[in-house]
Image (spheres, rainbow, N blue to C red):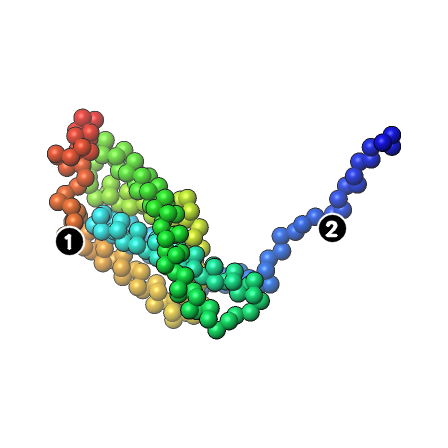
């Protein structure tokens, strides 16, 4: 008890934990695949923005379904990988178990998807409401709201389960040059069709009869009062 207190020796430099990447991980290739990945992500962003400006309600519903599907697949595949890691090898019934457990992970993914989409819709709503105060044209405001929606879905709370699988799919698509160009063509055609419909037919508010700030609604009264 009377022995003097001894300070523990300082840790050695070689004993500190180091972040070592997994041996199976490889950085995505550069050059042409990197260009294709950039075009794919840019095309997806443009498709969401232009689709929202063309049909806000329908585009928001499609974004909800896509986010829920991607997050469900993310939870299901991650659970399957963890089971295989614990057992040390793959079993013949793993695909059956993965498919059978997908309804449960659909329920699990729903809560996070609702949180993410409520956040994204709230940010887009605030941006749109601030835009309405200046009495500016409709279409640029919808484009601005669509941009806020796309960015919020990509970087919002819980978006990692949406962002990481999407990046993996993009990397897998650009692993072959011809497949990457097909993917780029698909997303660019989608964005072009949405832009063409917006220019020729204008904005549609289906299944609603009009804009949420139309006269006779609560939001319309608030905007008129402001």
Farthest bottom residue in view: 92
Q: Is residue 156 visible?
A: yes
Q: CA distance from mark 2 to mark 1?
A: 66 Å
Dot 2 lies on which element? helix
- Quadrant assignment, res 224: top left
Give the number of the disc on residue 161.
none
The residue lying at 27 percent from left, 54 percent from top is 62
- Quadrant assignment, res 38: bottom left
Circles 2, 1 touching at the beta carbon (< 8 Å): no
Give the answer, above or below, for where 145 lies relative to 84.
Answer: above
Q: Which mark's residue is nearer the viewer, 2 or 1?
A: 2
Q: Is residue 37 visible?
A: no
Location of mark 2 (residue): 14
Location of mark 1 (residue): 200
Dot 1 lies on which element? helix
Q: Left or right of 198: which side holds 23?
A: right
Locate residue 152, reporting x and y percent.
36, 44
Locate residue 176, reporting x and y percent.
43, 70
The residue lying at 33 percent from left, 42 percent from top is 118
Say which of 113 and 225 sits in front. Answer: 113
Tell me the quadrant of the picture where the C terminus can be found.
Answer: top left
């Amino acid at each position: 008890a009377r022995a003097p207190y001894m300070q523990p020796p300082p840790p050695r430099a070689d004993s500190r934990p180091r972040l070592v990447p997994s041996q199976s991980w490889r950085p995505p290739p550069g050059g042409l695949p990197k260009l294709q990945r950039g075009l794919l992500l840019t095309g997806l962003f443009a498709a969401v923005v232009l689709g929202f400006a063309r049909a806000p309600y329908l585009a928001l519903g499609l974004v909800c379904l896509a986010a829920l599907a991607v997050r469900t697949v993310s939870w299901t595949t991650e659970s399957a990988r963890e089971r295989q890691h614990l057992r040390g090898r793959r079993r013949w019934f793993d695909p059956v178990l993965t498919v059978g457990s997908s309804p449960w992970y659909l329920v699990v993914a729903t809560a996070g998807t609702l949180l993410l989409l409520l956040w994204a819709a709230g940010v887009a709503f605030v941006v749109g409401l601030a835009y309405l105060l200046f009495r500016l044209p409709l279409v640029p405001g919808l484009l601005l709201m669509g941009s806020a929606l796309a960015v919020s879905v990509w970087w919002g709370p819980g978006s990692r389960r949406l962002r990481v699988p999407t990046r993996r799919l993009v990397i897998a698509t650009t692993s072959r040059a011809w497949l990457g160009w097909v993917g780029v063509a698909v997303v660019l055609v989608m964005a072009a069709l949405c832009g063409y419909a917006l220019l020729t037919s204008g904005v549609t508010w289906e299944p609603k009869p009009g804009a949420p700030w139309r006269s006779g609604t609560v939001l319309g009264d608030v905007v008129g009062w402001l």
